[in-house]
Amino acid sequence: MTAITELAAFGEKLADASAEIVLNYWRSELEVIRKSDESPVTKADREAEKKIRQLIESEYPHHGISGEEFGNVRLDAEYIWSLDPIDGTTNFMHGNPNFAISIAAEVDNKLEAGIVYCPIFDELFFAERGKGAFLNDRRLRVAKRNKLSDSVVVTGIPHIGRGNKEQFIEEIDQIISDCVKNFNFHLLSCTDKFVS
């Protein structure tokens, strides 16, 4: 097993540990705290990231950590883990299953492995530099479509106070214009039932 493959396997272990905690809070009453940028955070976010950090510190105490909930440590390290224990906290808080646990490993400032685990659907997206991307055990490939109008477009809307709202509106307007004849709204219809 190469060092990078070892890191990716450890990333999967971190995602599993986070999922175990997150699922204990799924569709329960959650106290929500607002961070300084007004984005939400819950006890589930904090407990899951705390567990991930403990595992990293135990296995790789010299590695750096960049975390969504507790800040950064050792960002000058050769190896750095980037953590978002609940990527999609707003969805999670409202019982919408479209959230994930996102973990990445950098080596010498290069992203080498990424793990996105959707625990409600038990879908593990995984990629390593030079080795491809996978969904569970199935290799993922780029679709052979040449026109945007033949594609499904999925996007998130930036949080208030984060991101460039004007740029987002400009870009989404261009995408809609490019594929207005066949614009696919499947995701919108699927998520409507989760809006409270």
Image (tube, grey):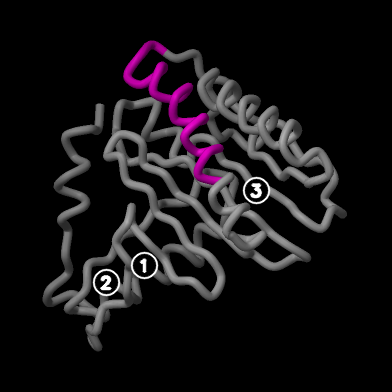
Rendered residue at 36%/67% (across/down): 172
- Mark 2, secondary structure of its residue: helix
Query: On the image, which quarter does residue 135 sit in?
Result: bottom left
Q: How many residues crowd mark 3 within 10 Å: few (<14), some (14–19), many (20+)? A: some
Location of residue 69 by image quarter:
top right
- Whole-percent x and y of residue 100? 42, 41
Q: Which residue is mark 1?
A: 172
Is residue 148 left or right of 90 when viewed as pictured? Answer: left
Quadrant placement of the N terminus:
bottom right
Q: Which residues are magenta?
A: 11-29
Residue that badge 3 annotates:
82
Q: Which residue is mark 2?
A: 176
Q: Position of residue 146 (x, y in %)?
A: 25, 88
Q: CA distance from mark 3 to mark 1?
A: 28 Å
Which image quadrant: the C terminus? Answer: top left
Residue 139: % across, % down: 32, 67
Q: Is residue 136 left or right of residue 82?
A: left
Amino acid type indicated by mark 1: Ile
Give the number of the mark in front: 2 or 3: 3
Residue 14 lies in the magenta stretch: yes
